[in-house]
Image (spheres, rainbow, N blue to C red):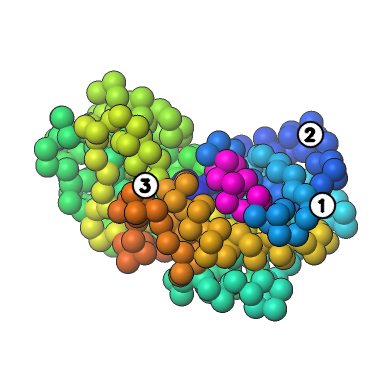
Amino acid sequence: MGAYPGTMRATLLAAAALLLLAAPAAARAADLVVGAFGGVWEQSLRKCIIAPFEKKTGKTVDVVLGAPLQWLNQIGANPDKPPLDVIYNATETAYDAINRGLVDKFTTANVPNIAEEKPEFASIPDGYGAIHNYGAMGIIYNTSTLKDPPKDWKEFVEGTVAGKWKAAMPSVNYPSGGLTISVWLFAKTYGGGVDNIQPGLAQIKRMKDSGNLTFWNDPNSVLNGLKSGDIDLALYWDGRAYSFIDDGNSEFKYYSPDPGVVVAMTWIQKIKNGSPLGYEFANTALSAEAQSCFGSAIRYGIANKDAQFDPKVAPEITKTSLLIFPPYKEIGEKQAAWVEAWNKQIGR
């Protein structure tokens, strides 16, 4: 994601198990080992958080790139001497880490900056980490082919069924958003919810059967489809959308349909039995200075209430008033049943 947006899917669990067997634990050449995501995410982390932390403490930090399921399995295999001290984690797998007893609790004593979290985010981790940044999934569309995009989610469904546009949305198998956006959001929109997803599945099937909706698992395929003209609009992450638009693709626009957009959050968590330096690192990462730098660099919202965005980036950040917070804990428990229902009704 946005934010890395990973879920506990069976296929990813299998992949993580293979990675666990194939990859040795991270070498302890540095004072602290941090699990993070690649690309601009890693670049922003090194610039905005690691560099000031190393300068302040005189300690060194190693970054291990990968995915949370992989890290959690590696940590679970050696919990007394974990290969990582701190990880960045998606909400779904952050709860998995908590349930498996792999993370320590943050308090205002060991991580004072958790007191600076925006109230919308402060209570979500219950101390077992903190929200670091967030993204949201709205709609990106081609202004050359679509003059009147849908104003709300029901209009998106009806316009797709009617053939007003060619649309794309995440598959249930997309590891961040497949469950919360493509299942829960549409279920909620049509009178269902976490205990009744059938109303949402029925609408998704209508769109698919119309021939005007495709599903994506790879965010890059969305941009390719938009550029080629195969699709007119797509459900897509805000930060990625604006990066694409600002990179010479001004014919596209992004917005948040009514009544809001589902949030995907990235947490920072300290691993149990990892270095105590992890607390200080987390405190640095959650400071207003580091959050201002990181959010501006990566174009995603951040959790510190006093952080400020670069004026050029600020208008592109989804306001917290537009965010919809799914019941992530409950969704995680229903994941297998939801995927099975999707596969039976929508297809694999």
What amino acid type is highlighted by mark number 1? Asp
Q: Which residue is labeled 2 in the image?
A: 23
- Would you say the residues marked 2 and 3 are in contact, meaning their CB atoms lie under 8 Å apart? no
Q: Which mark is residue 238?
A: 3
Give the CA distance from mark 1 to mark 3: 35 Å
Determine whether the residue tagged by mark 2 lies in a helix, strand or loop: loop
Q: Using the rendered image of the protein, determine whether residue 211 is visible from the camera's viewpoint.
A: yes
Q: Residue furthest bottom?
A: 109
Q: Which of labels 2 and 3 is toward the front?
A: 3
For disc 1, the marked residue is 31
Residue 270 visible (yes or no): no
Disc tally is 3
Mark 1, other Cα within 10 Å: few <14 / some 14–19 / many ≥20: some
Q: Nearer the viewer, residue 236 or 303?
A: 303
Question: Where are the magenta residues, as a range?
Answer: 41-51
Residues packed near mark 2 inside 10 Å, few (<14), some (14 to 19) or many (20 plus):
few
Please name the residue shown 67% across and 39% down the image.
65
Secondary structure type for disc 1: loop
Question: Label 3 neighbourhood size at 10 Å, few (<14), some (14-19), many (20+)?
Answer: many
Give the left or right position of residue 17, taking residue 121 as reference: right
